[in-house]
Image: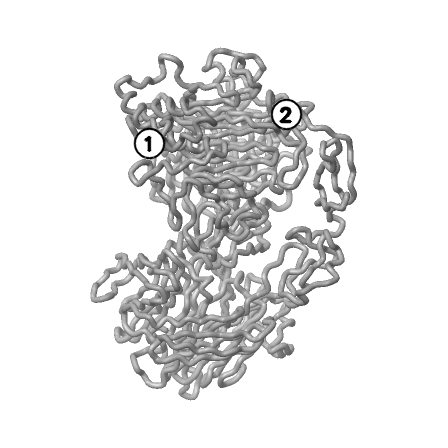
Amino acid sequence: FMQNYIEDYKGSSFKIEVASPPTSLQPTKVKVTALGKVYEKTVDPGKSVSFDLPKGVEMIGSKKNFPTVLIEASQEVTVLSLNYKKETADTSVVYPVKDWGTEYFIFTPMSTAGDRFSKEFSIINYKEKNFGVEVYLTAPVTFQRQKYFAGSKLTIDLLPFESVQIQSQFDLSGTNVISKFPVGVLSGHSCTKKYTGCNHVYEQLQPVKSWGKEFIVAPLPFHKDINRYDSLYIQTSQFTQVKVIQTGIDFLTLPMFPGQSLELIVTWPNSYYLSADKGIQVLYEFNGGDIGKKQYYDPFLFTILPTDQFSTSYSLEGQAGFHNMFVMVALTKDLGGFTVDKLPMPLKIEWHKVDGTEYSWAEVLYGTGASFHQIAHANSPFAIYSIGGAYANGYGSPASGNPDAPECPENSHYEVCGRGCPATCEDPEGPSMCNTSCVKSCMCDKGYVLNGKKCVPLSQCGCLYNDKYYKNGQVFHPNGLCQEECTCNGKVNCVKFSCGPHETCEVKNGVRHCQAVGKGVCTISGDPHYKTFDNSLYDFQGTCTYTAAQGCYLEGTRLNPFSVVVENEKWYAMSNNPKVSVAKLVAVEVYGNTLVLRKNQAGMIMVNGIMMSLPVNLNNGAVQAYQEGTYDVITTDFGLRVTYDLVYHIIVTVPGNYRGKTCGLCGNFNDNKNDEFQLPDGKVTKDLLTFGAAWKISVPHVVCEDGCSGEFCPKCEAKKKLIFEADCSIITNPQGPFVACHNVIDPTSYFRDCVYDVCLSEGDRKVLCQSISAYMIDCQDFGVNISNWRTATFCPLDCPANSHYQSCSEICATPCPGLSDIITCPTTCAEGCACNVDYYFNGTGCVKCDMCSCYHKGHTYKIGESVLSEDCQELCTCSTSGDVKCEATKCKADESCQVKDGQRGCYLKKCLLETNGAFTLFNERSGAITAMGAYEIIKVCDNALVEEWFRVVVTLQDCGKTGLKSVVAVYVYFNDLIVTVNSKHETWINGKKVTLPRLMSNEVSVKVNDKTVMIERMSGLQVSYSLSQEIIVTVSAHMADKVCGACGRLNPSGDIPGPSLNRTMQEYMDGWNAPDFPACR
């Protein structure tokens, strides 16, 4: 409890009020520990109990202490705190520890009470040591006799259950708190005032990860003086656009910067609707008000809930000695379905519509004195704010939302008392004898049964065949020789079958299949050294993109096509002008998916152009990608396996049934080293550069080379060679840690490559360690157990927080819940970092259980991460409970669902002109411009817009003899200047050639970013022109209905511009010839 007014003021009372939701099946045991004393009570479902605490729980001054109150319950409960002294009090919801976070932004109210009382906040620690809590101050404070100034960092070490209170005479709003482990944070004022007397106000803040994007704010009716108002505060953690709609006033959009606090004025009876593109924190401060007859209420502070935190049930605590009321916010369409203590809510409530939304609000007085109520709606989430006033006093907080029923999977629903032994595909009627008669759980809807963890229609259940159950769609071989192949599709259909070449009929993982005999392994390591499937060795220094391996000559087989592509780059670790290269990325194409692992992008993978967290599971497990040890792995159900350490080393493994069916830099896997350099046309060459160049993949606008050859490649001097042979000898040492692998994998080539790479890097220790690690990885890949070869001084492996080094770590030794559902745990181990005790592997690192990721539909989401569906119609967010909650969403009229920089989102619609004359309008209609000329692609057509007027013209000409068109120049017109850019990016402003960047006085900037000229006007236009002749035009939302031109309108009405069945793109473009440019035809 933070300091309320002054120490030892009369009438103090510190209470904890605990409520049990009516859905609880039995009484809940509650234990409260404060100052070493334990208080225990039992609360019945739908009831509440209160605990009076000793006054020592109040923190006084700016210091650390141990007055932390611990509340424990045998079932889910809601908790409210009351900090009361005579004529000064407030309440706050107490959030469970699982909802705490590691980053907060402080809010402290301004006050007219002078310097006598303090702005304050407190940080509460749980049962871990939490050293190094960082507080970035926005105002000066004195803490433990040391002064800290605004802008400085205060670092605090907190012991288990230790708390700290920070006070200041200055505004602490925007102060940033960052901790290693989750903490609780309270914020407020010891006694703030504006219009009436002063009052203690406080709230437990929500961490940044829990902030929302949409808010409904209802006013309070306590101001008789029309010149008085309440204050609404918005806080941001990053650059944010906040849209504000107030009753009767047009909306406005407010740009806010990180850590900013913004005050809005709230007057009766005007409500607010707020929406933001990033999470924000919103707090309401009642500034005190006269209620007549010389009576007045003092200030209080409460949090405004985002709409995604609305609940369907609330516990409402009326406080003794106060006139109690509540404010409701609910969907307008559902106003008739509320209950109070399970009885219908009276219909006399006066509801007020919130402009621009589907919500309404109301205020309800419900009596004086202590009371307890349960308010609920059957299925529509809503918000309740608990408000109270007394002479020279007041309190306010969100009501305690009861734990909602968990979000159930598709085709199921939540039941408080469901069947303990549900029906399944294997047993559609369910067992006749069941020891568990009643459980709280998700139950399948009518007509559905459990199939594994999913509810499916009975028609999708599997098949019984020879007393064995097979899943729907499962292919199996019922006899020991795989002479029959059967498929379960409602019923079993079988056909004659036989295994292919290099396959044998075996049982693996409990399933009989044709299993490949043996495997082919290709390694690409260092600068780079290749070892093919047939164990041929060669060095190839190309810096382009190449096909490493792909399935070839697969016609007439049951083998799956695949492709493994490697992009190289110059290895600058070697020198400033290296002649050798190293892998930059690995891309695998299989089953219609493209998966890309990039150098130094740990924990991430790009899947079909979208950046995702590892692990991922595609095509129902047919493709998996995950982190194992020090490298990332991509595997398929037919045996393809690709690993990349994101620095140095790549392994491509194919199953033995691909013998003679591969091609690329890894060879043809036919056990014949004499035809290893096979070209795409099937011919064989002896020339390495010819072979490498033949498998090069052309990438537009990328300049690369195929590397050195023979005498032109760098050599290691003999005297240096002797030095580095000693360093690398650990690989071949017959008494060394790798001796167990020598008979499995010949270490000679690894030793030679190590010496060469370390020599060229002038003894770089990282290169040495990576070279040795390459042999370690390959040995473990073959199942060889290698003892620890690293020491504290020789190639130590730095492990991230909460983990330690192991030479043989298993990723599923301590997995987060759900991790093993998304990947098939490897049966082997790998060198890497294992989790410390009480920490769990989330797929990329080790975390506490309550920080584990969510695993949903084959993808991994970090806590708080939100991801849009492919059509941007659904937004799914990983909650702190480990569940993924999805809600309907849609792009705005001036936006479209696009992918940018690996992120899918709603981005401003763009108009695109490409190098070959391909033209795409805002409405995504496209076609080819076939005639030279000058075209007005966009301009302001609203004559009322003078200051914001602009016009963009592009000129096109023939590109050689191809018949295609290329851009000659771009002309961007503003009121007082013209920007001209030609195809070489030479730039003129008002006819004068200039160097970039340039910033004009009228907010127009011209700059170069990543070989692209960017012309921007802050009021709403961006034109980009790349060296590849690509032009992109975007305009901001407020210009949507004010522009025209060949790009079309962002919000078209009536005739839809662009090519159609009746006209070509060129016919459409002829209508937008620039009249002031000379004709080209």
Q: Secondary structure at mark 2?
A: loop
Residue position for label 1: 994
User: Which quarter of the figure is the C terminus placed in?
Assistant: top right
Residue toward you, 741 or 972: 741
In the shown orientation, is residue 195 left or right of residue 866? left
Residue depicted at 51% across the width and 41% down the height: 626
Q: Residues within 10 Å of mark 1 (few under 14, many from 20)?
A: few
In the shown orientation, is residue 1040 left or right of residue 203? right
Residue 803 in the image: above or below residue 158: above
Question: Looking at the image, which residue sits at the far top?
Answer: 686
Residue 688 in the image: above or below residue 76: above
Tell me, yes or no, if residue 958 can be seen here.
no
Instruction: Point out the tag, 1 or 2, that comes first from the N-terminus.
Output: 2
Count all numbered tags in the image, as a single digit: 2
Gap in angstroms between the C-alphas marked 1 and 2: 68 Å
Residue 1069 in picture, x, y percent from top left = 58, 32
Q: Quadrant of residue 337?
A: bottom right
Residue 867 in the image: above or below residue 777: below
Residue toward you, 1047 or 229: 229
Residue position for label 2: 502
In the shown orientation, is residue 301 left or right of residue 468? left
User: Which quarter of the figure is the N terminus placed in?
Assistant: bottom left
Residue depicted at 73% across the width and 59% down the height: 431
Q: Secondary structure at mark 1?
A: strand
Kind of residue at badge 1 = Val
Residue 893 in picture, x, y percent from top left = 56, 49
Q: Residues within 10 Å of mark 2 (few under 14, many from 20)?
A: some
Question: Looking at the image, which residue sits at the far bottom?
Answer: 293
Kind of residue at badge 2 = His
Residue 143 in picture, x, y percent from top left = 25, 65
Residue depicted at 67% across the width and 28% down the height: 558
Residue toward you, 570 or 684: 684
